[in-house]
Image (spheres, helix red, strand yellow):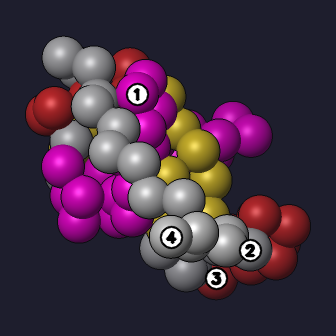
């Protein structure tokens, strides 16, 4: 049976990535500024992070649709 656009594959995160499960609140740096967000999806060596909205990051939210991909080594739990 065809799934037509619904590709659901399980991604096994790296050892570093296992410390950052989905819904973990993290801090990271993007464009030289510290940002915070919540992990929405795990990838092998990175995660899709939903950026927390603040007054000083409205432009970043607008340009990225509120979501960025960050390497696990560039984030820390908060």
Measured from the top left, where is residue 1 in percent x and y? Answer: 50, 70
Q: Which residue is mark 4?
A: 1
The answer to whether the residues at label 3 and label 4 have Cβ atoms under 8 Å apart is: no
The first of marks 4 and 2 along the sequence is 4
The answer to whether the residues at label 3 and label 1 have Cβ atoms under 8 Å apart is: no
In terms of secondary structure, where does tag 2 sit?
loop
Q: Which residue is mark 2?
A: 65
Measured from the top left, where is residue 40 in percent x and y? Answer: 39, 64
**Is 2 displayed left or right of 27 in the figure?**
right
The answer to whether the residues at label 2 and label 3 have Cβ atoms under 8 Å apart is: no
Residue at horizontal 23 percent and vertical 65 percent from the top: 23
Could you classify mark 3 by the number of other residues whose Cα lies within 10 Å: few (under 14), some (14-19), or many (20 or more)?
few
Measured from the top left, where is residue 26 in percent x and y? Answer: 31, 51
The first of marks 2 and 3 along the sequence is 3
Question: How far separated are the C-alphas under marks 2 and 1?
Answer: 22 Å
**Is 34 displayed left or right of 65 in the figure?**
left
Give the residues drawn in magenta, as a range.
21-47
Question: How far separated are the C-alphas under marks 3 and 1?
Answer: 32 Å
The first of marks 2 and 1 along the sequence is 1
Q: Which residue is mark 1?
A: 44
């Amino acid at each position: 049976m065809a799934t037509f656009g619904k590709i659901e594959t399980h991604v096994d995160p790296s050892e570093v990535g296992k410390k950052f499960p989905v819904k973990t609140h993290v801090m990271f740096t993007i464009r030289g500024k510290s940002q915070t967000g919540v992990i929405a999806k795990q990838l092998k060596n990175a995660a899709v992070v939903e950026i927390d909205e603040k007054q000083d990051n409205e432009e970043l939210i607008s340009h990225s649709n509120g979501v960025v991909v960050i390497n696990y080594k560039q984030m820390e739990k908060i």
